[in-house]
Image: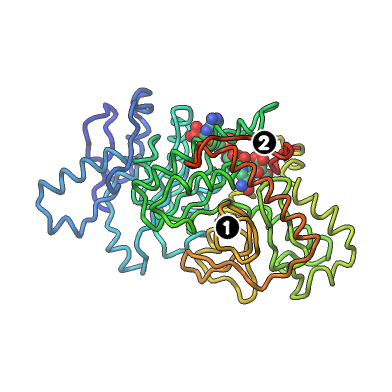
Amino acid sequence: MGLSTGYSPAGSRLVTTPLGAGAGAALRRSPQLLRPRRPPLATVRCSVDTAKQVQDSAATVAAEQKASRKECFGVFTNTYDLKADSKTKSWKKLVNIAVSGAAGMISNHLLFKLASGEVFGQDQPIALKLLGSERSFQALEGVAMELEDSLYPLLREVSIGMDPYEVFEDVDWALLIGAKPRGPGMERAALLDINGQIYADQGKALNAVASRNVKVIVVGNPCNTNALICMKNAPNIPAKNFHALTRLDENRAKCQLALKAGVFYDKVSNMTIWGNHSTTQVPDFLNAKIDGRPAKEVIKDTKWLEEEFTMTVQKRGGVLIQKWGRSSAASTAVSIVDAIRSLVTPTPEGDWFSSGVYTTGNPYGIAEDIVFSMPCRSKGDGDYELATDVLMDDFLWERIKKTEAELLAEKKCVAHLTGEGIAFCDLPEDTMLPGEM
Ligand SMILES: NC(=O)C1=CN([C@@H]2O[C@H](COP(=O)(O)OP(=O)(O)OC[C@H]3O[C@@H](n4cnc5c(N)ncnc54)[C@H](OP(=O)(O)O)[C@@H]3O)[C@@H](O)[C@H]2O)C=CC1
Ligand SMILES: O=C([O-])CC(=O)C(=O)O
């Protein structure tokens, strides 16, 4: 970084300031400027590649700088030369990551993990594109200020906005967390409709402007059906690229098996969560292994596995809310990190991980055309294959059918959002999110 530029307190004029003062200038903006009608958005790159400046005409560069700086947050308006950094530090090409619900609880943990390099690696510079709303915009600026103050070397750009068509432009990853929480007395059908609408809009936006190979992880609940809606509204993006987060459930299940077996949790492998991220989910103890041996051989108490273990995992979120008064945020952020890392690093030989993915073409006989948590393996290229070396028995299959029935019913409730006709909502029973009791 050389000369640094920031917003003037007056707003429209760009001023050149000594290095570091750009952030201060951004923070001193008046309240109106802190909440502009149209928020600053990264419709162009935040940064200006100084190597490129040498070749381009001065006028083009000036225009590009003006446009880009206007649309980035605080210190991230500053010029940097990523090419020079890549050379000296062997950094990879910048990865663009969009996060929705970015001012929420989960994001508050996740963003700092992303920026620290623990997710994509210490040689991977990133740009964060944070999606908020009128409701959260000021909070989002607070989040961006904390990111500025953390001085993460790998965090090259931060932009904030309220329009998914602008925030999602060229993104390589979309971590979709924003969703209305289910309030007391609210029907699951109403939640499906409200949040489904959000995910239909965001799917359309991804379809229009994101990288053609964007990987999408849907966290906002009900995450399986939200992921299906998002995917159906993004026909130009491979269906395989959409995931619903069930990694938190997998982590919870591993923890319970480790506790019962008296081992550390890194000894538990092949832990599948089948189905919906709800209380019908199926933590699979038939295929799970402890220290390389079938879990059922190590834990001989079948009653415990079938009843207590299963229920504890299904309802872990609710118990946590009762204790803490809020839903899991830190452990959810950790599980999002795990989910991403499972896609960008090769799966250890013989193991697998759980993710809610599109069922079409699945080898297990699960109904097609839903998003269902299943065992996956990755070569570390962002893609995955479903594991085929999986055992099935009557107990497991019966439970899988129950969670499948729930997802098929959810799908009917949102037919108006997936382009499949008129919605008809007749849920088999009002099952709960893991966080509800
Ligand atoms: N899959 C999983 O394993 C888990 C999923 N979850 C789910 O993740 C989601 C986010 O959780 P968390 O970060 O704790 O929640 P928060 O309430 O802290 O944040 C959620 C964000 O959602 C956005 N939002 C979108 N629409 C609405 C709306 N109509 N009303 C209120 N907020 C809205 C808000 O941002 P903005 O205003 O900017 O849009 C808000 O910041 C929830 O749906 C939760 O159920 C939680 C734990 C585990
Ligand atoms: O229901 C919620 O919001 C929380 C949740 O998904 C979980 O803890 O698994």
Quarter of the image where ligand 2 sits: top right
Residue 66 image point, x, y percent:
20, 41
Q: Quadrant of residue 289?
A: bottom right
Q: Nearer the viewer, residue 404 or 74?
A: 404
Res. 309 visible in picture = yes
Please name the residue shown 55% across and 56% down the image.
358
Q: Which residue is mark 1?
A: 359
Q: Which residue is mark 2?
A: 426
Does residue 70 lie above or below 274 as drawn?
Answer: above
- Left or right, 412 with respect to 119, comes to right
Q: CA distance from mark 1 to mark 2?
A: 22 Å
Please name the residue shown 54% across and 62% down the image.
341
Q: Nearer the viewer, residue 356 or 328?
A: 356
- Left or right, 236 with respect to 420, comes to left
Q: Quadrant of residue 191?
A: top right
Res. 329 visible in picture = no
Q: Earlier in the sequence, mark 1 or mark 2?
A: 1
Residue 433 image point, x, y percent:
69, 41
Label 1 SS: loop
Does residue 195 lie above or below 345 as drawn?
Answer: above
Crowding at mark 1 (Cα within 10 Å: few <14, some 14-19, many 20+):
many
